[in-house]
Image (tube, rainbow, N blue to C red):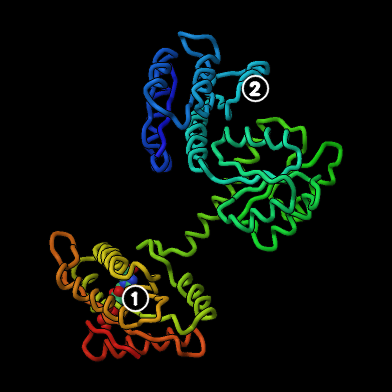
Amino acid sequence: MARVLIVEDSKVVQQVLRHLLTQKFAREFIKHVDFAWNYEQAQELLEQHTYDLALVDMTLPDCASGDAARLTIEHNVASVILTSSMDESQRQQMLELGVVDYVIKDNRDSYLYAVRLLTQLLRNKGLPVLVADDSQLSRQVLKQLLQRQLYHVIEAEDGEQALAILREDTSIKLLLCDYAMPKMDGFELVRAVRNHRGRDDLAIIGISGAGNNGLSAKFIKYGANDFLTKPFMNEEFHCRVLQTVEQLHLIEQIKATAERDYLTGMFNRRYLQEHGRRLFAKDKHAVTVALIDADNFKQINDQYGHQAGDSALRQLAQRLQQHLDEHIVARFGGEEFAVLAHCHDSAQLQQQLENVNDSLRDEPIELADSTHTLSVSIGLAAMNHHDFDACLSAADKALYRAKAQGKCQLVCE
Ligand SMILES: Nc1nc2c(ncn2[C@@H]2O[C@H](COP(=O)(O)OP(=O)(O)OP(=O)(O)O)[C@@H](O)[C@H]2O)c(=O)[nH]1
């Protein structure tokens, strides 16, 4: 978790920033925040601590304009400038100094923008980025700019090398590639990469020389997410990289939401079915599926109310995760859950499932001011059917028998 330094002499601005930094999106990435009122205090704090990022007011009472940012950069702290105004020469001066970005504080939204920018930079900290360019000088320039945004930069001298690195290292989430490269040019590289890495998995920014506008559009058509034309301003580079990575992050979030159950945070039915079908196609004999249904759950809703029922489902979900943590556990719907186990030994899974009822009996779930002893019925099926859906339906039949035979038990098909 990161430590951030904020250098700001206005009490009101400090208060607004303090408030924004307590919001969930910021707390997720920023653990410690130190505030300095002036240059002198900033200097003391920089000597005491190591900072990941600094947000620095351009104008402070005890130093010349921009000196505080100069100080944080000298201490190798990636720095974002806060300023109420900035003329063109100051802007150039700050960007040349090496600040990551600047934020003009002209309304409340600018502070939100600044704090969001800090969290974005921290979220991307250490994220591997590949730079493919045959010119060592260009690679150096891009590397410096990316390191300023806290990325971890990997270099490739040509398209072939870049392709080999990307095949090997799937943690790379951004590729910056020049058009003119020996062996394999930028277009060929993008096309080849897209055969195994989709737009939602790896973002690509193509870079092309000036005077050939057609190249930029072509980059996009071949599969790049965005492009930059040389020479570009550092500020434009920063915005495009940040925006491209942000889009990738949003897609990841949407995908994660689509496969999770809102109430329990577990995988949902859709994920289980998709994953189950994939596993079945790969190795059907090593997969076992179980359906787990809470017994007499209606009583909980009737007796304690729907909210307590929701809490009971969350507690049951936690209990299942605890006992079956090496398998995929999903909420199948309502008060029904499913387990997908990738194992050759179904006896072990059977034991783990039996343990769930023992645990619910020994440690009843907590509802309002009392406790309630919940139990589950379980139907287990092996994957010796013609497809995954047939396995699920066999587990469902076994579950039906468990209910019919008196509940709180496991039945194998
Ligand atoms: N609170 C809450 N209740 C839910 C949710 N989903 C399903 N239920 C309730 O679960 C209950 C299921 O009732 P039944 O199908 O009769 O099953 P049961 O009472 O568990 O009885 P058996 O399955 O026969 O043991 C219903 O009252 C549903 O309203 C949910 O998300 N939250």
Picture residue at 41% right of the left edge, 28% below the top:
50
For the C terminus, which image quadrant? bottom left
In this rendering, position of residue 388 left or right of residue 214? left
In this rendering, position of residue 303 left or right of residue 205? left
Q: Does mark 1's beta carbon lie closer than 8 Å to ligand 1? A: no
Residue 3 position in % (x across, y down): 40, 32
Residue 127 position in % (x across, y down): 54, 45
* Nearer to me, 105 or 342: 342
**Residue furthest out toward the right:** 211
- The residue labelled by disc 2 is 96
Q: Quadrant of residue 403?
A: bottom left
Amino acid found under the numbered disc labelled 2:
Glu
* Nearer to me, 352 or 240: 352
Amino acid found under the numbered disc labelled 1:
Glu
- The residue labelled by disc 1 is 336
Q: Does mark 2's beta carbon lie closer than 8 Å to ligand 1? A: no
- Dot 1, how many residues are within 10 Å of its Cα: few (below 14), some (14-19), or many (20+)? some
Q: Quadrant of residue 296?
A: bottom left
Picture residue at 40% right of the left edge, 70% below the top:
328
Residue 262 position in % (x across, y down): 40, 61
Picture residue at 60% right of the left edge, 25% below the top:
98
Secondary structure state at the residue bearing disc 1: strand
* Nearer to me, 248 or 167: 167
Picture residue at 64% right of the left edge, 46% below the top:
130
Q: Is residue 126 above or below residue 93?
A: below
Q: Is residue 316 above or below residue 51?
A: below
